[in-house]
Image (tube, coloured by chain):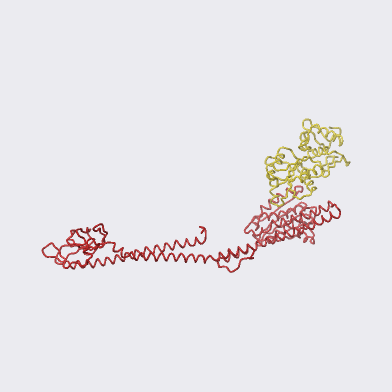
Amino acid sequence: MRILVVEDDRNLARQMAEALTAHHYAVDLAHDGEEGQFLGDTESYDAVILDLGLPVIDGVAVLTDWRRNDRRMPVLVLTVRDRWHEKVAAFDAGADDYVVKPFHLEELLARLRALIRRASGHTSSTLVCGPLSIDLGNSKVSLDGAPVVLTAHEYKLLAYLAHHRGRPVSRSELIEHIYSQDFDRDSNTIEVFVRRVRKKIGAEFIRTTRGLGYQLVCEPEPGAE
Amino acid sequence: MRSSSLTTRLIAGAGVWIAAALLAAGVVVSAFLERHAEQGLQQRLAIHLDALVAASETEDGTTGLTLAPELTDPRFERPFSGWYWQVGDGGDPVLRSRSLWDQALAIDPPAAAGHAAWLRLEGPEGQRLRALVRDLTLPDDDRLFRYAVAAEEGVITAEIRPVQRTLTWMLAGLGGGLLIALFIQVRFGLRPLWRMRRALGEVRAGRAERLDADYVKELAPIAAELNALIDHNAAILERARRHLGDLAHGLKTPLSVLRNEASLHGEVAAGLVAQQVGLMTRMVDRHLARARSAGAGRILGARTPVAPVVDTLRRTLLRIHADKPLDFQCSITADAVFAGEREDLEEMLGNLMDNAAKWARARVRVAVAQSDRGLAVTIDDDGPGLPADRRRDALARGTRLDESAPGSGLGLAIVVDLAKLYGGRLTLGDAPEGGLRVALTLPAA
């Protein structure tokens, strides 16, 4: 899951980036409205945390512009503006959730999780896929009740596939959503991660569709790949 | 004196009228004088004419006309003196005064025979004359003689000029006197205004608290308004000072807890920091909210239709609580109007509706009714509700009923503060569906 954080307070941005990274998110940071708007327009994110009082371009303007350009990623507004008419303005501009500063990081993470889950059409914080169960709250994966130990990148890959299990996910889409912007991307590593995850949960859960990508399968036929 | 000054306006306005009236008086009196002098001249000339007629004698059988004793007035003897007489047989002069010398008066035929005509004539050496002319026949003679007696116009002018001069000086003196009186009157009339200005200066300088009550009838309401404004300012200042004091005191406690903890143990437990910071945050929020709303209720005539506000909030809240399948219904009488600022209404209803949505299991009902007594807002949810003995606490300032639902206690405190500011009130009760009912009543628009 790749997140864009647009926040002009560098300390707060760093704090959030650390917390998000610890929860297996890939994070891009922008410190003003212009940079944030550009990243949101050109990169592909699973969610955006957007401050409203931003230098150069105001957050509401950034959000309005994204929605006008048909950028539909879920946006969580994080701001000191706590009056209702300000909330209404943000939601009318296309916000999906609203957290008022000062905030608890845990609350922010929980809201972000719920937002991403809702955006991909899931209602529970635990994604269940046949015998496979992925707890998005604590990033734990279990197979038939037994915990599966995954590295951070392996988890990101599996979680992304689980969110979009209705369709095959291309290798380039996986790259975009697993790595942050400044990461040295190599598409071959995706194959390595897929191979490792298959080894840990069973190869039949991840189906390869030639030319389209990988898809998580919840009731696999044994032996299929 | 500046062109926009009250004194200038008053003096200029009255000055124009005074000048016009004096000028008109001068013209009328002067015309009257001239007419009077002219009539006097006419009468004198009539006497001369009668004397001339009386002295005329005709000799039978001759064409001549003689004057028995000549007119004795020496002015008719001196050549070109300005006083002339002439007797003509028809148009031709037969006899004339010595003053005419070798000239004759050219006289157009007068209007009607038998009546004297008052004419303007041109005399010798271009003199402008007034003449009394009369055609008549003498006894024992059937010829028509034209008698004319004339005097120079200058006689009239010379007679009235000294009077005119005196009149002009008198009118000018009167005008000057009136202007001075006017100036004094304006200064006197405006004196309460200057006094008020000085008094305001005293208030601003801090030497006086408010304006005196004893102003003239026209200024008394202004003085009263100014006093109200001064009081309002003082009240706002006082309230701001009190809030600042409350805030400072409130913050000092958590700060000292943290400092003591740090000095006692060398380090502070994270939980304690979080708790105390939470306390301070709530305090800052509440005082900020109060500071924003301070004085808002004073805005007179602000009217906000309720329905659009509720609709907007409902839309926003459905997105905020998108995790829950909420059945969120509002029924509002179309004419419902709140007598105040839109933002304050949004603040009150937003907090109340948000609380309801937060605690509701599945249903929220908002009803707004307008009556003569005011606006009644009822918000019901089907959540756990609140036991009667805890409702008072819930409305008390800043109390937080449930720490896991951030902001709930604070939200109610803000609503209570705002409602009070607008003269309304907030009550908690039981909803028919088992949850909490929040009733907000606000005064009529």
Foreground residue, A68 or B331? A68
In the rendered structure, the colour chosen for chain B is: red
* x and y percentages locating residue A52 in the rendered image: 71, 47
Residue placed furthest toward the top: A210
* x and y percentages locating residue B198 in the rendered image: 59, 64
Residue placed furthest toward the right: A146
User: Taking B10 as reference, is B34 left or right?
Assistant: left
Q: Which residue is located at x 60 percent, y 63 percent?
A: B201
Foreground residue, A82 or B34? B34
| A188 is higher (above) or lower (below) than B177 | above
Residue placed furthest toward the front: B78
User: Taking B382 as reference, is B114 left or right?
Assistant: left
User: Taking B185 as reference, is B278 left or right?
Assistant: right
| B56 is higher (above) or lower (below) than A154 | below
* x and y percentages locating residue B418 in the rendered image: 70, 58
User: Taking B338 as reference, is A158 left or right?
Assistant: right
* Quadrant of the image occupied by residue B251: bottom right
In the rendered structure, the colour chosen for chain A is: yellow
Question: Which quadrant does the C terminus of chain B fall into?
Answer: bottom right
* x and y percentages locating residue A24 in the rendered image: 81, 41
